[in-house]
Image (tube, rainbow, N blue to C red):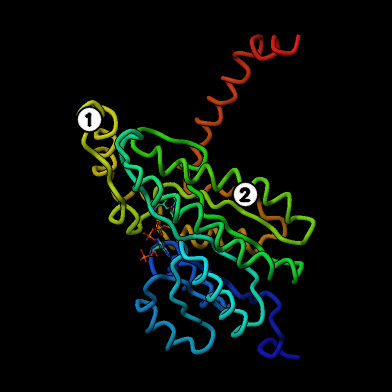
Amino acid sequence: MNETSTPRTDLRTWLITGATSGIGHELTLQALENGDNVAALARDTSPLDETARAHGGRLLLVRTDVRDERTVQGAVDAALARFGRIDVVANNAGYGLFGAVEEASDAQARAVFDTNVFGVLNVLRATLPVLRAQRSGHVLQGSSVYGQSAHPGVGLLAATKHAVEGLSDALAAEVAPLGIKVTLVQPGLTATPFLANLDVAAGLDDYDPTVREVQKGIGELPATAFSAAARIAAGIRAAVDSPNPPLRLALGASAATDMRSALTERLADLDGRQGVTDAMDE
Ligand SMILES: NC(=O)c1ccc[n+]([C@@H]2O[C@H](COP(=O)([O-])OP(=O)(O)OC[C@H]3O[C@@H](n4cnc5c(N)ncnc54)[C@H](OP(=O)(O)O)[C@@H]3O)[C@@H](O)[C@H]2O)c1
C-alpha cells in the first residue's frame, strides 16, 4: 500500500460552537485543513458559506443559538445524520461583560451566564449521550485566564468562566470511566473580535480609579500583547492530538502568569491561616 492510499486514522468529526469568529473560526479552518469533518454552529453561519462550498460535505453549517436547547439538539442531530459520530466537542461560544460587579444589571449578569454557562450545559446535554454511546470523545470547555483569576472589571465574565471550571472538574471525573476526555481551554488575551463584542456596564464614578483604569489599560495594549487566534487554535488541536491531554490548558504567557499569581495567592491564604482553619476541628 503506498502512502496516498494508506487510510488515515487521525481524522475526526468536530462540533464547534461560535465557529464563524475568532478562535472557533480558526479551529474550524484548521480542522478542515487537516482533513477532518466539522459541524460548525453559529447564530449566523453565512460567513462560512464560501468555506462550505470549498470543502463540500466535510463542513456542515447549522444555525444555532447555544442559549436555545432545541436548536442545539437540532444541530447535534444534523451532525450525526451527516457524519455518523462526533469526536470533539468545542464548547467555544461566549462573550464578555466588562464593568464593576455592582454596575452590571441583573439582565446583563443573567444574559452572560445564559450564553457562557447555560449554553455550555445545553451543548453538554445534547452531545454527551453521543459520546457515551461511542465510549469515546473529547470535550473542550471554553474557559479563559479568567477561569482561575480576575481583576477589576471582569467579575461577571470571571464568574461565568469559574462556573465552567468548577463543573468541568466534576464532569471530567464523571466521564473519564466512559472513555471521554475533558480539557478546559484557558487562553489569555487573544486577537479576535472578543473586545469589540464586549457588553459594557458602567455608571458609577467610584469605580473610575479601578475598573475604568483597567479598561483604559487594556485599550492601550500593543498588538503584541495579544496571541494570534491561529496559534490558540493550533494549541487546542495539539491537546486533542495528545494521547494524554491535560484537564487545564493555559494558552499564552499572560494567561500562565496571571493564573500562577492567582493560584499562589489562594495557596498563601490557605496556608497562612492554617491555625484558624485547624482550630475548627479541635
Ligand atoms: N479573545 C480573548 O481574548 C479570549 C480570552 C480568553 C478566552 N476567550 C474565550 O474564547 C471563546 C471564543 O471567543 P473569541 O475570542 O473567539 O471571540 P469572538 O470572536 O467574539 O467569538 C465568539 C463567538 O461566540 C459566538 N456566540 C456568542 N453568543 C452566542 C450564542 N448565544 N449562540 C451561539 N454563538 C454565540 C459568537 O457568535 P455571533 O457572531 O453570533 O455573536 C462568536 O462566533 C469565548 O468563550 C471567550 O470567552 C477569549
User: Considering depth in this image, is 27 or 169 the residue closer to the camera?
Assistant: 169
Residue under pointer 2: 168
In the picture shown, does residue 243 fall above or below 13? above
Q: Amino acid at mark 1?
A: Asp
Quarter of the image where one finds residue 132: bottom right
The percent coordinates of residue 22 (x first, y second) are 39, 62
User: Considering depth in this image, is 247 or 236 the residue closer to the camera?
Assistant: 247
User: Considering depth in this image, is 199 or 52 the residue closer to the camera?
Assistant: 199
Q: Residue at x 73, y 56 (%)?
A: 175
The percent coordinates of residue 167 (x first, y second) are 61, 47
In the picture shown, does residue 159 fall above or below 126? above
Is the C terminus in the top left, top right, bottom left or bottom right quadrant?
Answer: top right
Label 1 CB-ligand 1 distance < 8 A? no
Q: Amino acid at mark 2?
A: Ser
Q: Residue at x 79, y 56 (%)?
A: 177
In the picture shown, does residue 118 fall above or below 37? above
- Determine the quadrant in which ligand 1 lies: bottom left
The percent coordinates of residue 226 (x first, y second) are 36, 50
Label 1 to label 2: alpha-carbon separation: 35 Å
Q: Residue at x 58, y 74 (%)?
A: 76
Let me know if residue 73 appears in the view: yes
183 sits left or right of 251 in the view: right
Task: Classify mark 2: helix, strand or loop.
Answer: helix
Task: Classify mark 1: helix, strand or loop.
Answer: helix
Q: Residue at x 55, y 48 (%)?
A: 164
Label 2 CB-ligand 1 distance < 8 A? no
**How packed is label 2: few (under 14 Cα within 10 Å), some, or many (20 or more)?**
many
Question: In the rendering, which numbered label is found on residue 208?
Answer: 1
